[in-house]
Image (spheres, grey):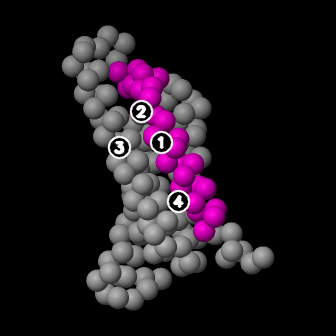
Protein backbone atom coordinates (compact mmCIF):
# COMPACT_ATOMS: atom_id res chain seq x y z
CA UNK A 1 0.00 0.00 0.00
CA UNK A 2 1.46 3.32 -1.05
CA UNK A 3 1.31 6.38 1.19
CA UNK A 4 -1.05 8.06 -1.30
CA UNK A 5 -3.65 5.36 -0.60
CA UNK A 6 -4.11 6.49 3.00
CA UNK A 7 -4.35 10.24 2.38
CA UNK A 8 -8.05 10.45 1.51
CA UNK A 9 -9.24 8.25 4.42
CA UNK A 10 -6.91 10.07 6.80
CA UNK A 11 -8.21 13.41 5.57
CA UNK A 12 -11.81 12.23 5.99
CA UNK A 13 -11.19 11.05 9.54
CA UNK A 14 -9.30 14.19 10.57
CA UNK A 15 -11.88 16.53 9.04
CA UNK A 16 -14.78 14.63 10.57
CA UNK A 17 -13.06 14.56 13.94
CA UNK A 18 -12.37 18.27 13.98
CA UNK A 19 -15.90 19.02 12.74
CA UNK A 20 -17.49 16.92 15.51
CA UNK A 21 -15.34 18.41 18.27
CA UNK A 22 -15.93 21.96 17.00
CA UNK A 23 -19.66 21.38 16.72
CA UNK A 24 -19.76 19.91 20.23
CA UNK A 25 -18.64 23.30 21.59
CA UNK A 26 -22.15 24.62 20.94
CA UNK A 27 -23.69 22.29 23.54
CA UNK A 28 -21.94 23.86 26.53
CA UNK A 29 -20.55 27.37 26.05
CA UNK A 30 -20.03 28.39 29.67
CA UNK A 31 -16.63 26.76 30.40
CA UNK A 32 -15.06 28.80 27.60
CA UNK A 33 -17.07 31.98 28.17
CA UNK A 34 -16.24 32.51 31.83
CA UNK A 35 -12.44 32.92 31.34
CA UNK A 36 -13.22 35.61 28.75
CA UNK A 37 -15.27 37.68 31.18
CA UNK A 38 -14.11 39.85 34.08
CA UNK A 39 -14.89 38.71 37.63
CA UNK A 40 -17.78 41.16 37.80
CA UNK A 41 -19.56 41.13 34.45
CA UNK A 42 -22.87 42.38 33.23
CA UNK A 43 -25.46 40.51 31.21
CA UNK A 44 -24.52 42.63 28.21
CA UNK A 45 -20.86 41.55 28.44
CA UNK A 46 -21.94 37.93 28.75
CA UNK A 47 -24.18 38.17 25.70
CA UNK A 48 -21.45 39.87 23.66
CA UNK A 49 -18.92 37.18 24.55
CA UNK A 50 -21.46 34.44 23.83
CA UNK A 51 -22.24 35.96 20.43
CA UNK A 52 -18.54 36.19 19.51
CA UNK A 53 -17.98 32.60 20.60
CA UNK A 54 -20.93 31.41 18.52
CA UNK A 55 -19.62 33.37 15.54
CA UNK A 56 -16.15 31.85 15.62
CA UNK A 57 -17.46 28.34 16.26
CA UNK A 58 -19.95 28.78 13.39
CA UNK A 59 -17.22 29.98 11.03
CA UNK A 60 -15.04 27.00 11.92
CA UNK A 61 -17.94 24.57 11.49
CA UNK A 62 -18.94 26.13 8.18
CA UNK A 63 -15.42 25.90 6.77
CA UNK A 64 -15.11 22.29 7.90
CA UNK A 65 -18.52 21.38 6.46
CA UNK A 66 -17.59 22.87 3.08
CA UNK A 67 -14.30 21.02 3.15
CA UNK A 68 -16.02 17.75 4.04
CA UNK A 69 -18.56 18.20 1.24
CA UNK A 70 -15.74 18.94 -1.21
CA UNK A 71 -13.98 15.76 -0.16
CA UNK A 72 -17.13 13.67 -0.46
CA UNK A 73 -17.92 15.18 -3.86
CA UNK A 74 -14.55 13.92 -5.09
CA UNK A 75 -13.18 17.27 -6.25
CA UNK A 76 -9.91 16.99 -4.34
CA UNK A 77 -10.08 13.39 -3.17
CA UNK A 78 -7.28 12.17 -5.44
CA UNK A 79 -5.16 15.31 -5.57
CA UNK A 80 -2.27 14.19 -3.40
CA UNK A 81 -0.62 17.56 -2.88
CA UNK A 82 -3.93 19.08 -1.72
CA UNK A 83 -4.58 16.07 0.52
CA UNK A 84 -1.17 16.40 2.19
CA UNK A 85 -1.77 20.07 2.96
CA UNK A 86 -5.31 19.48 4.16
CA UNK A 87 -4.28 16.58 6.38
CA UNK A 88 -1.65 18.84 7.99
CA UNK A 89 -4.24 21.60 8.55
CA UNK A 90 -6.72 19.11 9.99
CA UNK A 91 -4.16 17.46 12.25
CA UNK A 92 -3.16 20.83 13.68
CA UNK A 93 -6.81 21.82 14.02
CA UNK A 94 -7.79 18.55 15.72
CA UNK A 95 -5.01 18.91 18.27
CA UNK A 96 -5.81 22.57 18.92
CA UNK A 97 -9.57 22.14 19.31
CA UNK A 98 -9.13 19.02 21.41
CA UNK A 99 -6.72 20.92 23.68
CA UNK A 100 -9.31 23.68 24.01
CA UNK A 101 -12.00 21.17 24.95
CA UNK A 102 -9.73 19.28 27.35
CA UNK A 103 -8.65 22.47 29.14
CA UNK A 104 -12.28 23.44 29.93
CA UNK A 105 -11.09 26.76 31.33
CA UNK A 106 -9.40 28.12 28.25
CA UNK A 107 -10.42 31.43 26.71
CA UNK A 108 -12.61 30.95 23.63
CA UNK A 109 -10.49 33.54 21.77
CA UNK A 110 -8.07 30.68 21.20
CA UNK A 111 -10.60 29.38 18.67
CA UNK A 112 -9.90 32.43 16.46
CA UNK A 113 -6.34 31.15 16.05
CA UNK A 114 -7.66 27.71 15.14
CA UNK A 115 -9.90 29.36 12.55
CA UNK A 116 -7.09 31.49 11.11
CA UNK A 117 -4.41 28.81 10.95
CA UNK A 118 -6.40 25.63 10.39
CA UNK A 119 -9.94 26.15 9.09
CA UNK A 120 -9.52 29.16 6.81
CA UNK A 121 -6.48 27.88 4.83
CA UNK A 122 -8.26 24.58 4.15
CA UNK A 123 -11.41 26.39 3.12
CA UNK A 124 -9.48 28.69 0.77
CA UNK A 125 -7.65 25.72 -0.72
CA UNK A 126 -10.99 24.04 -1.44
CA UNK A 127 -12.42 27.23 -2.94
CA UNK A 128 -9.36 27.56 -5.20
CA UNK A 129 -9.87 23.96 -6.28
CA UNK A 130 -13.57 24.58 -7.00
CA UNK A 131 -12.74 27.70 -9.01
CA UNK A 132 -10.12 25.84 -10.99
CA UNK A 133 -12.31 22.85 -11.74
CA UNK A 134 -15.61 24.57 -12.47
CA UNK A 135 -14.52 27.86 -14.05
CA UNK A 136 -11.12 27.14 -15.56
CA UNK A 137 -11.93 23.49 -16.36
CA UNK A 138 -8.59 22.11 -15.22
CA UNK A 139 -7.13 20.44 -12.13
CA UNK A 140 -5.97 22.83 -9.46
CA UNK A 141 -3.04 20.79 -8.19
Alpha-carbon span between mark 1 and mark 4: 14 Å
Percent x, y of residue 44: 21, 19
Q: Which mark is residue 77?
A: none
List the residue tagged with mark 4.
Answer: 89
| C-beta proximity under 8 Å, tags 2 and 3 | no
Considering only order in the chain, which callout, 2 or 4, is on the residue closer to the N terminus?
Answer: 2
List the residue tagged with mark 2.
Answer: 26
At numbered mark 1, what does the secondary structure look like: helix, strand or loop? helix
List the residue tagged with mark 1.
Answer: 22
Residue reaching furthest front? 73
Classify residue 102 by image quadrant: top right
List the residue tagged with mark 3.
Answer: 58
Task: Name the residue: 51% across, 25% down.
Answer: 105
Q: Residues within 10 Å of mark 4 (few under 14, many from 20)?
A: many
At numbered mark 2, what does the secondary structure look like: helix, strand or loop? helix
Classify residue 65 by image quadrant: bottom left
Given residues 28 and 89, the one toward you in this image is 28
Considering only order in the chain, which callout, 3 or 4, is on the residue closer to the N terminus?
Answer: 3
Given residues 5 and 29, the one toward you in this image is 5
Amino acid sequence: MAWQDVLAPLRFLATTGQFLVTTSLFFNLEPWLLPALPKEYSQLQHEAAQEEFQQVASLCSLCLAVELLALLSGCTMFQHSANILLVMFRAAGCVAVSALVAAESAHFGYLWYVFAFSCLPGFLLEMASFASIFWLHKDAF
